[in-house]
Image: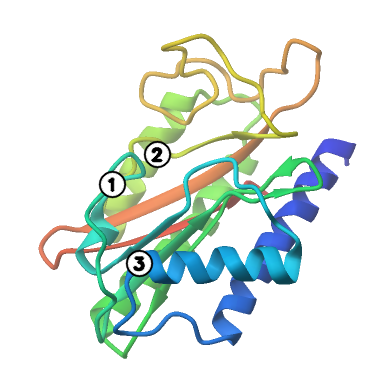
């Protein structure tokens, strides 16, 4: 395992522990706004884990907002009884980027529990599918995710299906160059090395949307 990947895994483990601490503290509850929950997560990250910086915008989406893609900034919503809630954070840990997201459920709705468990199962399936390749374009992987969502009975809600991470700030390409995203217009090989000959490290994100029932679910972490 190269040193960069080892540090990325350590950053991701810290993000996972942060999410577990949020659960243990019982912060995800009805009657709280998304903004209020975000403020509490940020405070917990700083006080318990020493995390002061995040490399992308901090995202909490509840209820109908769980259908919205990353680029959307819907109005602040209040968490309701029986809601799904998405947490998506990109903490910087010891100079390395994590990108971690999970969906939580309040209540016992079978429909909402199903989309939450389905997106987790689909992430594992897509991760296993990727691992069988040694050459794959971002466009081909994105199309696989769209087809996977359909097979599970959903729409694919993400504008991308993932991206690279690395030491902060991670490698960037020129304007309009989507070569570091799992995107329908990225026809470059995800297994290409960076200009220094180093392996790139990819995040896989899956966003399922059930338009009929106005709900969505999301999972994101490093490709194993």
Q: Quadrant of the N terminus?
A: top right
Are there few (<14), some (14-19), or many (20+) residues within 10 Å of tag 3? many
Q: CA distance from mark 1 to mark 2?
A: 27 Å
x then y, percent, for residue 184: 36, 25
User: Is residue 154 among what the camera can see?
Assistant: no
Residue at which label 2 appears:
144
| Count of picture labels | 3
The answer to whether residue 53 is above or below residue 138 is below
Secondary structure under the numbered disc 2 in the rendered image = helix
Whole-percent x, y for residue 117 in the image? 41, 72
Residue drawn where x is 74% and y is 65% of the image: 49
| Mark positioned earlier in the residue sequence (2 or 3) | 3
Q: Spatial distance from mark 2 to mark 3, Cα to Cα?
A: 32 Å
Which residue appears at 41% of the width and 62% of the height?
119
- Label 1 residue SS: loop
Task: For the residues labelled 1 and 3, say whether their Cβ atoms are less than 8 Å apart.
Answer: no
The way the protein has been coloured in the rendering is rainbow
- Do we see residue 50 in this rendering? yes
Which residue is under mark 1? 73
From this view, report whether residue 98 is shown above or below residue 169.
below
Reading the image, the residue beneath label 3 is: 34
């Amino acid at each position: 395992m190269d040193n960069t990947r080892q540090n990325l895994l350590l950053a991701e483990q810290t993000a996972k522990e942060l999410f577990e601490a949020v659960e243990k503290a019982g912060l995800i509850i009805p009657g709280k706004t998304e903004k209020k929950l975000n403020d509490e997560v940020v405070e917990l990250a700083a006080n318990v884990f020493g995390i002061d910086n995040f490399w992308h915008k901090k995202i909490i989406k509840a209820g109908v907002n769980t259908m919205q893609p990353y680029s959307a900034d819907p109005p602040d919503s209040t968490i309701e009884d029986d809601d799904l809630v998405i947490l998506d954070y990109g903490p910087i840990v010891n100079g390395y980027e994590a990108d971690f997201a999970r969906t939580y459920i309040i209540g016992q709705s079978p429909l909402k529990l199903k989309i939450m468990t389905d997106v987790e199962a689909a992430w594992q399936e897509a991760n296993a599918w990727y691992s069988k390749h040694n050459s794959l374009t971002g466009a081909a992987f994105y199309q696989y995710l769209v087809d996977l969502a359909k097979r599970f009975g959903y729409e694919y809600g993400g504008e991308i299906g993932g991206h690279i991470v690395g030491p902060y700030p991670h490698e960037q390409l020129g304007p309009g160059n989507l070569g570091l995203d799992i995107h329908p217009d990225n026809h470059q090989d995800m297994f290409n090395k960076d200009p220094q000959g180093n392996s790139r490290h990819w995040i896989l994100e899956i966003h399922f949307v059930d338009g009929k029932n106005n709900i969505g679910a999301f999972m994101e972490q490093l490709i194993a």
